[in-house]
Image (tube, rainbow, N blue to C red):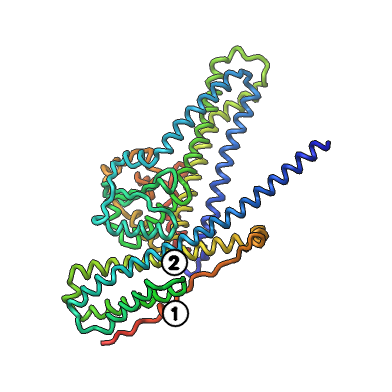
Amino acid sequence: MVVLLTWIIIGILVLLVLIFIYYFNKFVVLGNRIDNSLSQIDVQLTKRADLVPNLISTVKGYAKHERKIMTEVTEARKALLSAKNLPEKMKAGAELQNALKSIFAIAENYPQLRANENFLHLQQELAAIEDKIAFSRQFYNDSILAYNNSVQTFPGAFFAKIYTKQKKEFLQIPTEAKAVPKVEF
Amino acid sequence: MSHEVERISFHDEIQRNKLKSFFLIVVIFAFFILLGYLISQILDSSYFFIILIFATIFSLLYVVISYYNSDKIALASVNAHPADPTEHRMLFHAVESMSLASGLPMPRVYVMNSEQINAFASGRDPEHAVICFTTGALSKLNKQELEGVVAHEMSHIANYDIRFMTLTAVLVGMVSIVAQMFLRNLWITGERREGKGNIILIIIAIFAAILAPIAAQLVSLAISRKREFTADATGVKFTRYPMGLKNALIKIRDEHVPEKDKHRYPKAVAPLFIGDPYKKKFQNLFSTHPPIEARIKILERM
């Protein structure tokens, strides 16, 4: 009788250890997914920043006088490359996006620029990257959601406390990005 | 836009269909156990079970090998060639975007020659996945529609549907093997059996052995249809734009394909495609795909 009891207790202890391991691993996996999706956003932002010098030199060939907007773009790019944390990167990324929108709006006035093959190619590439930035942000938020769900629902919440895991913040779109850019002529 | 219809969330759709397909697999497994039990009540020969085990091992081996090479087999059977990043730029952009949205590694991209709008995904897991599009799809779909179809295909990869359907096929196969061997054994040793099990039980077992494989196959087709719905809903989770896939399905539905083109598709690969390549007029229990109208209606409500 005592032997049976001992085996049952051992069984329950093994089960408990497995459950502890399960939740520990779950938090690690979901947390890593968030980090990975963050670096993906980074990759796309950097790709966009990398296309800027080429764009600037193409535009300069046709629209030398639009100094203001070209300076804005170059400054925004510098800010993005030197940004250190997520909020800074989001802000710099939004400013670069606005500046680029202005460039393409202004390009409407220069038909020769618009017809330039390199310019068209860059325009398409940048448009595609905008999409990808949006999708990588979406996945980041999805990862945060999965993590928050695991940390807040029962019984995960209990283990979250033990492993000191807390829910994380969703990515906010910076307000500058929502505003329509003013185009100066 | 239909405002009177109740909106459904893709999260719920995914959950609902995954649950249903799990339940259906349990049903097949139950068939298997039931059949095995009935047979064990009637037959006595242990050699029967030894042969059964061997047969199961061999068929499992066959299934596992084809599962591991599912990507190569599927591509070879339709004569697919690798897609070109320059020529098929829109396709590559769509696949890259969907890889970002899903968090999956990028699958290998292939193209096959066919006027029909269609696509499939294969591969044992996300790291060894391939997707393939017809030239018809690339020329007839716009950016959002293409993205929707890419999302649907990548959903199959994300939900491990190839693995799931292989598992289902194994179970169905096992039911067939058990049933067949039982019937064969009955036929051979008919006179020599004595007193084990009454005649009614034997009749029931015979019926079960004949019907079980058919029933299991029907259940497996039902599972396939549920996974298609799941892939539609998961695709929406990636694009957050149900209209894209919906419009693509509408184009597929309204397409007119010359008869000769339909025979390009080997039968075994047909279930993998997003649209039924044979364009059967009647949707019924034997279809691997749910009716296109139903899929469109559900996407409209998301």
> Mark 1 sits on what residue?
A175
Q: In the image, is A11 to the left or to the right of B266?
A: right
Q: Secondary structure at mark 2?
A: helix
| Front one among A70 and A155 | A70
Quarter holding the N terminus of chain A?
top right
Residue at mark 2 to residue at mark 1: CA–CA distance: 16 Å
Task: Tell if the residue under mark 2 belongs to the same chain as the one under mark 1.
Answer: yes
In the rendering, which numbered label is found on residue A137? 2
Asked if labels 1 and 2 touch by Cβ distance under 8 angstroms, the answer is no
Note whether residue B281 is visible. Answer: no
Amino acid bearing label 2 = Arg
**Residue B78, position as x, y percentages in the image:** 31, 41
Give whichever of B289, B158 is nearer the camera: B158
Chain under label 2?
A
Total number of numbered discs in the rendering: 2
Looking at this view, name the residue that lies furthest to the left: A112
Residue, x 43% and y 38% (percent of image)?
Answer: B67
Q: Is residue A33 positioned above or below A123 on the image? A: above
- Up-down relation of residue B280 to residue B49 (above or below): below
Q: What residue do we see at 58% from left, 54% from top?
A: A26
What kind of element bears circle 1?
helix
Q: Residue B25: image x %, image y %?
A: 55, 42
Specify the amino acid type for callout 1: Thr
- Label 2: how many Cα within 10 Å (few below 14, some 14–19, many 20+): many
- Checking the image for residue A165, the label placed there is none
The vertical placement of B295 against A130, above or below, is above
Residue plotted at (62% across, 20% down): B43
Q: Earlier in the sequence, mark 2 or mark 1?
A: 2
